[in-house]
């Protein structure tokens, strides 16, 4: 290594690379990184292990849907059952 990395990786280097994806542009890669950072630990572990069935099940969890509906209702000041998800 050249030693020109940021201080964080110099002081506490990564132990292993668990998952990587390739993208056409930097902006698309940053959007994907931001998306994955918002995920729960269980969902990230399913992604790393390649468990697509588990990943889909976690994405469709009723608890997540309730949380999304109540958040949309609070933001828009509407009844959560009337709120529509952004397209």
Image: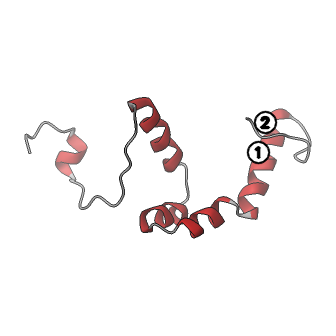
* Most foreground residue, 65 or 49: 49
Q: Residues within 10 Å of mark 1 (few under 14, many from 20)?
A: some
Q: How many marks?
A: 2
Of the 4 image quadrants, the one containing the C terminus is top right
Question: CB atoms at circles 2 and 1 under 8 Å apart?
Answer: yes
Which residue has dot 2 on it? 75
Residue 4 horizontal side relative to residue 79, left or right: left
- Percent position of residue 77, x then y: 87, 35
Residue drawn 54% across and 62% down? 43
- Percent position of residue 78, x then y: 90, 38
Classify 34 as above or below 48.
Answer: above
Give the secondary structure at mark 1.
helix
Which residue has dot 1 on it? 71
Residue drawn 70% across and 61% down? 60
Classify 7 as above or below 58.
Answer: above
Residue 51 horizontal side relative to residue 82, left or right: left
- Percent position of residue 27, x then y: 44, 30
């Amino acid at each position: 290594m050249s030693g020109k990395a940021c201080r964080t990786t110099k002081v506490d280097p990564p132990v292993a690379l668990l998952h990587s994806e390739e993208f056409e542009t930097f902006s698309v890669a940053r959007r994907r990184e931001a998306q994955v950072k918002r995920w729960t630990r269980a969902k990230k572990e399913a992604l790393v292990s390649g468990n697509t069935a588990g990943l889909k099940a976690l994405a469709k969890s009723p608890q997540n849907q309730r949380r999304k509906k109540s958040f949309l209702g609070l933001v828009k000041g509407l009844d959560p059952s009337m709120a529509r998800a952004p397209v």
